[in-house]
């Protein structure tokens, strides 16, 4: 479904409306005979307004919206429907002919408007669609719509990664091609389902020429590598960390941005504190516990069960790095050549998961950071990442990681093999044979060194290996990720 009306907030043509099919039908069902309406709640930017707009398209619907600037003005949201001097009873009478009312940003309504919405729900002659944002203060008259069971509530979750990929494919075609999987993952991770932020970031990346064509991709895909563009919208979302006035808090945030996770040490600081770790590359530093407690109370940092401290939102680190001055960034940076131990730990965890055929997602922030910044990763690490993605059935992502290991003319046989396996399991054995250069086992590797094929495990959204797609090729084309390749991978310095 494509909507060519201009977006009221951006004056730009919106992206096609994709996904949310079940939620759209649920909203439309709430407006049928015998139903009184629905309250829709969810995080800011997750598409609540767009959902209800699509659901009521073609209907006779009156619309009101709350705004921060008019919260103290009586009946401000209903100014186009109700006289300024009307009482609550009079305002209710003026709306007696309205059969469907959409109330957007209901958490920003003035008290009189909120009371009017509540009375409309109580008497039930007007069907209501009420939209409010999670985490924001809500007038009591609005919250009682669902706590008092006047209207059912639909909690809208952020758009999942798969639907985000479909949305990006439909709305961001660039030069005849779409975005490659690692770029899609990065955008989804940074935006956490905030579609307004997603659109802003994609627009900034395109306008500033930060997209580059993926070498070796048959589908004309584009990749985004490098710093996050700090637009007005990005700065607004990261304002809590960019505008911290406390120097101790800002110091912690910036050090986490350049070297997270940092260890939490509850012991009193010695006169000469030890370094944070060989991968950090920082001068001796001990986290200020009082400042850290304040940051945790404001939900800006997260401390896990093992005492590792991380930034709570994945957007904050890139924005703090981009906003840091050149000299400060140079002092705080954990340079790529010092990330070896952290990369080794991630690679070992991935290899262990592959051996166990465990398809649960694993945190791998260092590898993702290096790729996002455009820094080449060791080919052995890339091959293991590709193998893990292939085990999960994420074949396009597996191919993307294999290509990362083949950057700058590298000819690593394990990456070539993973690229060929991803192609074969995607149903293109001809491309797989071409990737291997016509050699049945790829770069002279002996099929005897490969681990025997395992039965398909976990979700396979893009087609697992089948006998028809792979049986015509060498035994190496019927393997799960190579255990020997993971153990012999080169280690980062």
Image (cartoon, grey):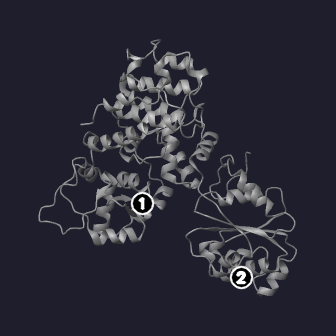
Task: Determine the residue positioned at 21% across, 52% down.
Answer: 282
Q: Is residue 477 positioned above or below 265 on the image? A: above
Image spot of residue 280 (x, y percent): 25, 50
Q: Is residue 364 positioned above or below 319 on the image? A: above
Decide: few, some or many residues near mark 2? Use Cα within 10 Å; few <14, some 14-19, many ≥20.
Answer: some
Task: Determine the residue positioned at 74% across, 55% down.
Answer: 24
Q: What element carries label 1?
A: loop
Frontmost of labels 2 and 1 is: 1
Asked where in the image residue 472 lies, by quadrant, the reply is top right
C-beta proximity under 8 Å, tags 2 and 1: no
Q: Can residue 215 be seen in this view?
A: no
Front residue of 15 and 163: 163
Q: Which residue lies furthest to the left in this view?
A: 271
Q: Is residue 227 left or right of residue 491?
A: right
Asked where in the image residue 109 lies, by quadrant, the reply is bottom right
Task: Determine the residue positioned at 49% across, 16% down.
Answer: 474
Q: Can residue 491 be seen in this view?
A: yes
Front residue of 288 and 222: 288
Q: What element carries label 2?
A: helix
C-alpha distance separating marks 2 and 1: 37 Å
Q: Residue furthest top?
A: 438
Asked where in the image residue 371 lies, by quadrant, the reply is top left
Q: Which mark is residue 115?
A: 2
Decide: few, some or many residues near mark 1? Use Cα within 10 Å; few <14, some 14-19, many ≥20.
Answer: some
Image spot of residue 261 (x, y percent): 32, 54
Earlier sequence position, callout 2 versus callout 1:
2
Image spot of residue 17 (x, y percent): 69, 48
Task: Determine the residue positioned at 68% across, 56% down.
Answer: 50
Q: Which mark is residue 312?
A: 1
Q: Is residue 42 left or right of residue 29?
A: left
Q: Is residue 88 left or right of residue 267?
A: right
Front residue of 17 and 343: 343
């Amino acid at each position: 479904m494509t909507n060519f009306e201009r977006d009221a907030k951006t004056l730009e043509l919106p992206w096609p409306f994709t996904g949310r099919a079940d939620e759209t039908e649920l909203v439309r069902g709430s407006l049928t005979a015998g139903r009184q309406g629905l309250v829709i709640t969810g995080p800011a930017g997750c598409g609540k307004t767009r959902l209800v707009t699509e659901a009521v398209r073609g209907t006779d619907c009156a619309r009101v919206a709350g705004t921060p600037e008019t919260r103290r003005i009586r009946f401000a949201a209903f100014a186009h429907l109700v006289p300024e001097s009307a009482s609550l009873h009079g305002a209710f009478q003026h709306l007696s002919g309205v059969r469907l009312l959409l109330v957007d940003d209901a958490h920003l309504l003035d008290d009189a408007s909120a009371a009017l919405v509540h009375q409309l729900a109580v008497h039930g002659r007007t069907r209501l669609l009420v939209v409010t944002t999670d985490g924001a203060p809500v007038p009591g008259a609005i919250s009682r719509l669902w706590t008092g069971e006047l209207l059912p509530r639909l909690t809208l979750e952020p758009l999942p990664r798969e639907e985000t990929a479909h949305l990006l494919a439909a709305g961001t075609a660039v030069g005849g091609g779409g975005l490659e999987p690692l770029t899609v993952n990065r955008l989804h991770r940074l935006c956490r389902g905030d579609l307004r932020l997603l659109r802003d970031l994609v627009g900034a990346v395109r306008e500033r020429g930060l997209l580059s064509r993926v070498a070796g991709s048959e589908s004309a895909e584009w990749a985004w590598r490098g710093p996050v563009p700090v637009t007005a919208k990005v700065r607004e979302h990261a304002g809590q960390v960019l505008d911290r006035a406390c120097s101790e808090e800002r110091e912690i945030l910036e050090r986490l941005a350049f070297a997270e996770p940092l260890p939490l040490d509850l012991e009193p600081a010695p006169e000469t504190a030890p370094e944070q770790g060989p991968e950090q590359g920082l001068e001796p530093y001990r986290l200020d516990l009082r400042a850290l407690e304040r940051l945790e109370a404001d939900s800006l940092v997260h401390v896990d069960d093992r005492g590792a401290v991380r930034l709570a939102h994945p957007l904050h680190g890139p924005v703090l790095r981009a906003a840091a001055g050149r000299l400060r960034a140079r002092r705080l940076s954990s340079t790529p050549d010092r990330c070896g131990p952290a990369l080794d730990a991630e690679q070992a965890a991935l290899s262990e998961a592959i051996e166990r055929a465990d398809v649960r997602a694993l945190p791998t922030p260092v590898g993702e950071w290096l790729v996002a910044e455009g820094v080449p990763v060791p080919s052995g690490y890339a091959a293991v990442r590709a193998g893990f993605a292939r085990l999960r059935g994420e074949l396009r992502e597996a191919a993307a990681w294999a290509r990362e290991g083949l950057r700058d003319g590298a000819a690593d046989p394990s990456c070539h093999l993973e690229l060929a396996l991803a192609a074969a399991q995607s149903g293109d054995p001809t491309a797989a044979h071409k990737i291997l250069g016509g050699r049945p086992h790829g770069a002279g590797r002996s099929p005897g060194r490969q681990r025997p094929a395992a039965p398909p495990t976990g979700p396979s959204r893009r087609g697992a290996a089948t006998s028809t797609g792979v049986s015509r090729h060498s035994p190496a084309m019927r393997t799960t990720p190579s255990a020997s390749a993971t153990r012999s991978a080169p280690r980062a310095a």
